[in-house]
Amino acid sequence: MSLKLFGGTIQRFDDDSSSLTSSRGVLNKVPQAEYEKIVADVMDDIYQLIVDTIGPNGWTILVTEPYGASPVFPNKDGFRALLNVKYDNPLSHTFYQVLRDCSVRLNTIIGDATTSVIAYVVQLFKNLLEVRRIPSDFKIAPTSIRHILSFFSEVIKDMIKDNPTYIKSLDVESTDEAVREQTLAFLEKVAMVSSNYDADISKSLIGIYRDMGFDINMSIEPGLSEESVIERDTGFELVSGYVLPSMVTEQDGLRCSYDEPYYVMIDGALTGNDLHQFAVLAEHVCYSLKKPLVVIAESFTQEIINYFSMVRAGVETPSGMYRYPIVGILENSHGETFYSSRFLDIATILGATPLPTRNGKLIDFETMSKSSFMSRLGSSERFIASPHMSRFIGGRGSKEAIEGRIVEIEKEIRDKTLSESIHFQVRIANAKKRIAMLRGRMVSVKVGGQDFKSRQYFVLVWEDAFNAVRSAIQHGITLGGNFAIGHLLANRYDEIIERVYTKVKVNKIHVVFGNLENTIKQHLTNVLNAIGSAMYSPFGTVLFHAGFTQENASKLIDSLTGIEYGNLDESTGTPKRTLGLPFTTINIKTGENETLDTENLELVVPGNTDYEILDAAFAVCSNLLTSRSLMPMYFPSEEGGTRR
């Protein structure tokens, strides 16, 4: 089986791939030997693709793009290379997607560890295969591995979480300036690690937190120039602009903006059927009260558009010509069902009560009084719109209603099911963005760069840094390199085994025939050693790229964790354990010991990094280790026969 690389695409060519055909016809089942070979090959491919990029001193990948502006360009980010992989073999591509989604999960949750988690998965999978081959009178049941890994994940997470030995919480509520600056300093180090040590992006990001506080969200997208543009307090965004150029109020000829506007929201189309009464009420707001009126509807008929055009051009009044300060916005310009989630968000933040429609007419609108109409309007401090974007700043909705809406969105996030990870995580990110906008703490970053390709790259770096900092604010910080788990295994190893064994007994999990205590604990010991030794596969690579020899890297890891991974116990074939050192690490630049509380510590990551890596890796390995074959789904085709 050969491997070829073409511009970020991995193609496998089977020289002697097994067939799914038999004398009984075609069977949609890949047998065990071929299944295991596909998994092993894909893991090896992906590992070899990203391993050289791991760590701040890693190598770059030269990516070819024959038809692009540059035929070849260097890429230091293994995650970006990973996202561009494609197998021509659909079965191989399926297992690539499993690894890709594992990496995407880490990128979204903690903004980092996207390549190290792949290195860990690959090594853990190999270690667990070896565990299954260890001679024993009673083999471990395959499905038990899933339960055991789940229990180890729960126990290790509980022992790390909220433990000041491993995680330093950040006081983001403090009003003390010194404490606040220390928190920002730690967050800047987190941003530096996740942004591949881009000092400019890290400082810009932390500057935003310094100005706006710690409870913010960001809209990050490519800009139009070399310089990045950061807009703070952008309010609630709607991807839809004004319907007529005559609604522009600013000298740039593109924007309209109003202070203290009113808003009327319509849960359907505004048509000529309601034009007369609408004109009366619009006159009351725009002329009598001299207030701007923003009209948000699903669509406007030509009669309404003509009315907008007329009143914007000017209406004859006793005091002369008067141009109505009125703006029409299409809420449903992007194909969403009306009364969408975004529409409800806007109504909540503005404090508006949408006017209902039926059969092309506003219900009870003809007899609506001016006072009743005014009671349904929303308001805000400021409104800004361009041809394709509207922003509502300082909405006057009640705090109770806004918090209630936020609770509803958070429940939507919890209730969603994970189908395709990338799309799922996009929905989660959009929901979090809506929550930030409801709280009025939204920042827009238009990322600069020399060309569009570089701007796209820096958008991804900004997103990584932001996700990592947001995770650190929520979960605290810890040392990079997964030292927490290594130190935990060295100092509380027996306690971990006992707690997992208790879970096995309480949940009545069948591990081996007879479920004898000594046999179960031996299997638990083997699995835990596999977990621990695999954890230092990515960090060993980081040290190697930093100039350590393989021998010195192994000695450093052994001394820090107390687990002699290079020294096997002959009786069990597993690593020997010694008493671990206090929780310290070594600065690879100076060679000096540093503790978690040392202000000069450089390698700082979000506090949930270690156990999120475990969760993601265990989920992948559980599925692969408890299966012996692969069955592609086939469906009847319209022409007869089958299609995949």
Image (cartoon, rainbow, N blue to C red):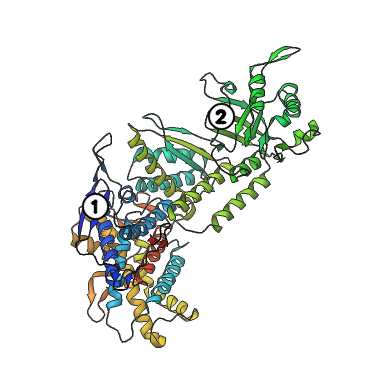
Residue of label 2 = 385
Residue under the point 76% across and 29% down: 277
Q: Position of residue 35 (x, y in %)?
A: 30, 68
Left or right position of 490 against 420: left
Residue under the point 30% across and 84% down: 136
Quadrant location of residue 564?
bottom left
Three-letter code for the amino acid on which mark 2 is drawn: Ala
Residue of label 1 = 52
Query: Going from the N terminus, do you reach mark 2 or mark 1 first?
Result: 1
Left or right position of 591 against 620: left
Q: In the displayed structure, would residue 68 be above or below residue 146?
A: above
Q: In the displayed structure, would residue 491 be above or below residue 637?
A: below
Residue under the point 66% across and 18% down: 323
Viewer-closest of 613 and 421: 421
Please identify the quadrant where the C terminus is shown: bottom left
Question: Which is closer to the viewer, label 2 or label 1?
Answer: 2
Viewer-closest of 473 and 282: 282
Viewer-closest of 472 and 341: 341
- Near mark 1 (Cα within 10 A), the count class, few <14, some 14-19 or many ≥20, is some
Q: Position of residue 341 (x, y in %)?
A: 60, 46
Please identify the quadrant where the N terminus is shown: bottom left
Viewer-closest of 297 and 175: 297
| Gap between marks 2 and 1 measured at Cα | 47 Å
Residue under the point 25% across and 67% down: 18
* Callout 2 secondary element: strand
- Near mark 2 (Cα within 10 A), the count class, few <14, some 14-19 or many ≥20, is many
Three-letter code for the amino acid on which mark 1 is drawn: Asp
* Callout 1 secondary element: helix
